[in-house]
Amino acid sequence: QVQLVESGGGLVQPGGSLRLSCAASGFVLDNYAIAWFRQAPGKEREGVSSITSDDYTYYADSVKDRFTISRDNAKNTVYLQIDSLKPEDTAVYYCASGLDRGRRYYRSRGVRVPDFGSWGQGTQVTVSS
């Protein structure tokens, strides 16, 4: 059974950091593209970052230079390091897996909900003083 479980969210002050984890079971992560999305109250789900099976990484403009996605194949886990957190980063963060469509695809089209079929339950990130 394919399962993705996020962890690492919490309440953090502006300027702080968090590392989110996405642990996979039932399949091998490094054969797929893995993405992180976030959804704030009243807003659509937004793709923020992805990593392909050959470690090409994509970041949305809103998070470039602050978010870092990485993979630990031995642990079958993908991470999202979030630095310099801002109040507007407050959201539920989801990881998702999908068919790896290659770096050209993600470079041109970004991270889109329809491209990812398996989802975790999400982890809440709240940035507030």
Image: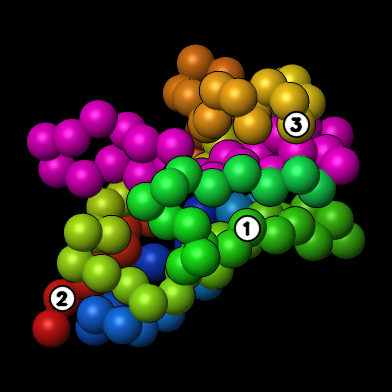
Q: Quadrant of the C terminus?
A: bottom left
Look at the numbered discs 2 and 1 and tell me whether their residues touch, using CB distance below 8 Å. Answer: no
Which quadrant of the figure has residue 1?
A: top right
Magenta-highlighted residues: 30-54
For image coordinates 31% across by 50% down, the residue present is 92
> Percent from the top left, x then y, of residue 49?
54, 46
Residue type, label 1: Ile
> Percent from the top left, x then y, of residue 45?
32, 33
> Percent from the top left, x then y, of residue 75?
80, 61
Dot in front, 3 or 1: 3
> Which residue in the protein does label 2 denote?
128
> Percent from the top left, x then y, of residue 101?
74, 21
For image coordinates 68% across by 22% down, the residue present is 105
* Residue 37 covered by magenta stretch: yes
> Which residue in the protein does label 3 denote?
103
> Which colour style is shown?
rainbow
Which is more toward the observer, 79 or 28? 79
For image coordinates 80% across by 48% down, the residue present is 55
Which quadrant of the figure has residue 22?
A: bottom right
In the image, taking residue 64 as reference, residue 4 lies left or right, namely: right
Q: Residues within 10 Å of mark 1 (few under 14, many from 20)?
A: many
* Residue 111 covered by magenta stretch: no
Residue type, label 3: Arg
Q: Earlier in the sequence, mark 2 or mark 1?
A: 1
Residue 89 circle label = none
The reply to whether residue 50 is in sight is yes
Q: Earlier in the sequence, mark 2 or mark 3?
A: 3
Q: Secondary structure at mark 3?
A: helix
Residue 69 circle label = 1
Q: Residues within 10 Å of mark 2 (few under 14, many from 20)?
A: some
Query: Marks 2 and 3, Cα distance to the nearest angstrom?
Result: 35 Å
Residue type, label 2: Ser
